């Protein structure tokens, strides 16, 4: 995400993004390309390393990440734990995503306007309409792309989460601080 791209977003979107205090995302179709593989040994999903790196960067900028997924999956649990997303912020098997959404708002004592939500399918529509700023991906349903504030350039599972996190952090002037915090953490570990 370069500075020119951020400057090309509308003033209205910049205003909305500046209010964001938490990012809530769907899982399948956002962190993945929507595919999953089932075999004799269980289910497999493909995740993008750059999305994981961005989630770590968000942590160093104090931007919490929560997941609300319509499907329950051990692959999702494992990936979220690997990225240090607390189990208490990972909701799976939620066909009604509004209940966990409201629970997350209470946990963080935030309003709808402080939430960025990312979704790609009809199950996400209520949250996309309620959140302060809404994002989707090019591989989302057309009905969803029509209602969101921003559609990423990257597809789900191919860096879309990174694009969104960097857009939020750069718009809020927190990206460099996050990188400095991350660099300092690594310096401390090498001493």
Image: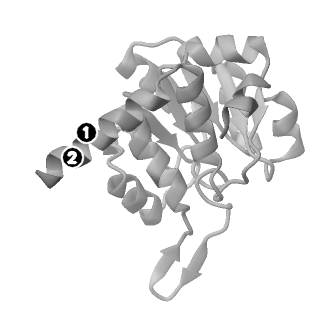
Regarding mark 2 in the picture, which secondary structure is present there?
helix
Residue 151 seen in this snapshot? yes
Q: CA distance from mark 2 to mark 1?
A: 5 Å
Work out which quarter of the rendered image holds the N terminus and state it: top right
- Pick whichever, 70 or 160, lies toward us: 160
Regarding mark 1 in the picture, which secondary structure is present there?
helix
| Residue 18 higher or lower than 174, as above or below | above
Residue 26 falls left or right of residue 76: right
Q: Which residue is mark 1?
A: 184
Residue 179 falls left or right of residue 158: left
- Pick whichever, 126 or 165, lies toward us: 165
> Residue at (57%, 36%) from the top-left corner?
166
> Residue at (44%, 85%) from the top-left corner?
41
Q: Which residue is mark 2?
A: 187
| Residue 95 higher or lower than 44, as above or below | above
Residue 63 seen in this snapshot? no
Residue 75 falls left or right of residue 191: right
Q: Position of residue 149 (x, y in %)?
A: 77, 26
> Residue at (67%, 67%) from the top-left corner?
35
Quadrant assignment, res 126:
top right
Q: Are marks 2 and 1 in contact (CB under 8 Å)?
A: yes
Quadrant assignment, res 125:
top right
């Amino acid at each position: 995400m370069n500075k020119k791209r951020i400057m090309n977003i509308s003033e209205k979107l910049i205003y909305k993004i500046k209010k964001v205090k938490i990012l809530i995302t769907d899982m399948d179709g956002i962190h993945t390309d929507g595919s999953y593989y089932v075999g004799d040994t269980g289910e497999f999903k493909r995740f993008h390393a750059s999305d994981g790196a961005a989630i770590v960067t968000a942590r160093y900028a104090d931007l919490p990440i929560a997941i609300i997924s319509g499907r329950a999956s051990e692959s999702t649990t494992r990936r979220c734990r690997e990225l240090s997303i607390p189990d208490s912020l990972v909701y799976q098997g939620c066909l009604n995503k509004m209940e966990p959404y409201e629970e997350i708002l209470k946990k963080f004592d935030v309003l709808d306007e402080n939430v960025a939500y990312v979704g790609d399918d009809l199950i996400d529509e209520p949250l996309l309409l309620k959140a302060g700023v809404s994002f989707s991906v090019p591989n989302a349903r057309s009905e969803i792309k029509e209602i969101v504030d921003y559609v990423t350039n990257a597809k789900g599972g191919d860096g879309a989460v990174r694009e969104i996190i960097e857009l939020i952090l750069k718009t809020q002037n927190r990206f460099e601080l996050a990188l400095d915090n991350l660099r300092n953490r690594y310096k401390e570990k090498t001493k």
